[in-house]
Image (cartoon, rainbow, N blue to C red):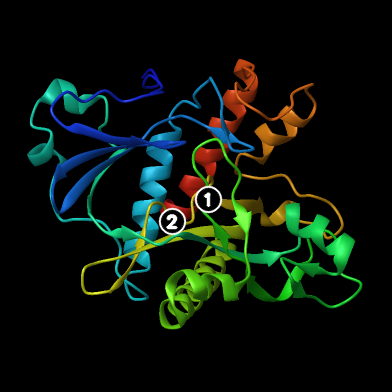
Amino acid sequence: MTAPEALYQSTLSSLKLRARGKVRDIYDIDDKHMLIVTTDRLSAFDVILPDPIPGKGRVLTNVSNFWFKKMEHVMPNHLADIPLEQVVPDAAERAQIEGRAIVVKLLKPLPVEAIVRGYLIGSGWKDYQKSGAVCGIKLPEGLHQAQQLPEPIYTPSTKAEVGDHDENVSFERTVELMGQELAEKVRDASLRLYKEAAAYAKERGIIIADTKFEFGVDDNGVLYLIDEALTPDSSRFWPADQYRVGISPPSFDKQYVRDYLETLDWDKTSPGPHLPAEVAGYCAAKYHEAEVRLTQG
């Protein structure tokens, strides 16, 4: 059986394109629903790379849908109970997006990315080395790279336009943007979602070092989990059996690609460099392994 072709960009003539993000193409269905297609595009350092990661969009869709269902007891999500066949009736057009498209409720997205960190790594580790804090949150002295934090911390950022960099902000800033009640709901939901998911994933040999959630509200102000959830794109996944304090562990996410890009003479602005086939293939394999461990374990 041959692997399905990679999808860099979807083209649906039956629906109106609303937007193309770093990874997702979004189409209007009606005034209450949208179609989200997760492509195989990969962004690194907020730049969309020119080469797709084969099968990545299907992995992200399947993993997100798994978590949406698993976390329904915590909060509702944006999935709509409408089959894809109803929205894209043409079989040939539907074939390109099968397994990577979801019908969702049209909600008002909140202007923050809700980031939860359970381990000291990445920009958080760099921040801590300089200031003893991560995004302004003071941490105990003497922590090491990749060490688990005493308690997960909530470090929100503002959403950037495609090609721009997200900016870390204080919780107080999110209160200014959304109001006290909603800001607290987002923070508390993010921490609960992370803790429950991290406990589940650890039983399956995956450490979720950190993750990013996005939320939206309906016309009644009800909070929903939207976009994607706890995927190798929105999270840092480590194999538990290779985890060591003091080193940056290998990962199931796009860190492998980031590490490769760091070896190049590239200024991290668009256009991004092409990926060698073996780098793209290795990344695709790690995404698939994470999917199997989480959803079939």
Q: Position of residue 182 (x, y in %)?
A: 41, 77
Q: Nearer the viewer, residue 158 or 114?
A: 158
Q: Nearer the viewer, residue 171 or 40?
A: 171
**Label 2 – label 1 distance at C-alpha:** 7 Å
Mark 2 or mark 1, earlier in chain: 2
Q: Quarter holding the N terminus?
A: top left
In the shown orientation, is residue 111 left or right of residue 249? left
Find disc 2 in the rendering and name its residue.
229
Q: Residue furthest front?
A: 176
Determine the residue positioned at 84% across, 78% down.
140
Find disc 1 in the rendering and name its residue.
234
What type is the residue that disc 2 sits on?
Ala
Q: Are marks 2 and 1 in contact (CB under 8 Å)?
A: yes
**Relative to 30, does residue 258 appear above or below in the rendering?**
above
Q: Position of residue 285 (x, y in %)?
A: 55, 33
Determine the residue positioned at 65% across, 28% down.
269
What type is the residue that disc 1 sits on?
Ser
Q: Nearer the viewer, residue 259 or 205?
A: 259
Instruction: Note whether residue 189 is visible.
Output: yes
Q: Nearer the viewer, residue 290 or 75?
A: 75
**Relative to 109, does residue 1 appear above or below in the rendering?**
above
Q: Position of residue 132 (x, y in %)?
A: 86, 69
- Residue 97: quadrant of the picture: top left
Instruction: Note whether residue 207 is visible.
Output: no
Determine the residue positioned at 52% across, 70% down.
174
